[in-house]
Image: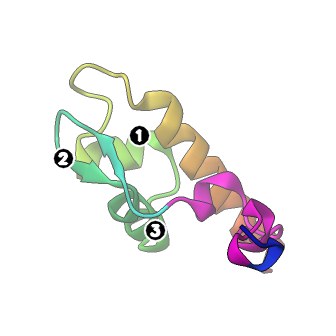
Amino acid sequence: MSNGSFCRYNEFMDDKKSLLEQKPDYLVCTCFGVMYSDIVNEIASGADSFDALQETLFIGTGCSSCVAEVKAILHEEDAKKIKNR
């Protein structure tokens, strides 16, 4: 195998994006079938807290295993909003 026949992992990763942003769309809440993109879209539409996301998407109201991930996504999206001001 020549050096040109394989690619390094870092060539595909955007160092300016967080690990959450680098993931493709994925299932966050298995109880209610809520995808990462659903959460990001709700935040973009004005949901500014975990409670607001819970009211609209019902996340964290089943088994609660998604709570930490949802809070991380909310934090990441808040940080992007602050950075873009």
Does 81 appear above or below 29? below
| Mark 2, secondary structure of its residue | loop
Name the kind of residue labelled 3 in the image. Answer: Gly
The quarter of the picture where residue 80 lies is: bottom right
Does 4 appear above or below 60? below
Q: Residue 12's x, y, as percent? A: 70, 72
Q: Earlier in the sequence, mark 3 or mark 1?
A: 3
Q: Residue at x 54, y 39 (%)?
A: 71
The residues bearing labels 3 and 1 have C-alpha atoms spaced at a distance of 12 Å
Q: Nearer the viewer, mark 2 or mark 1?
A: 2
Q: Does the magenta stretch include residue 22?
A: yes
The one nearer the camera, 16 or 77, is 16
Dot 1 corresponds to which residue? 51
Q: Residue at x 60, y 42 (%)?
A: 72
Dot 2 corresponds to which residue? 33
The residues bearing labels 2 and 1 have C-alpha atoms spaced at a distance of 18 Å
Q: Residue 60's x, y, as percent? A: 32, 30
Magenta residue span: 5-23
Q: Residue 46 carries which label?
A: 3
Proximity of marks 3 and 1: CB atoms separated by less than 8 Å: no
**Quarter occupied by the N terminus:** bottom right
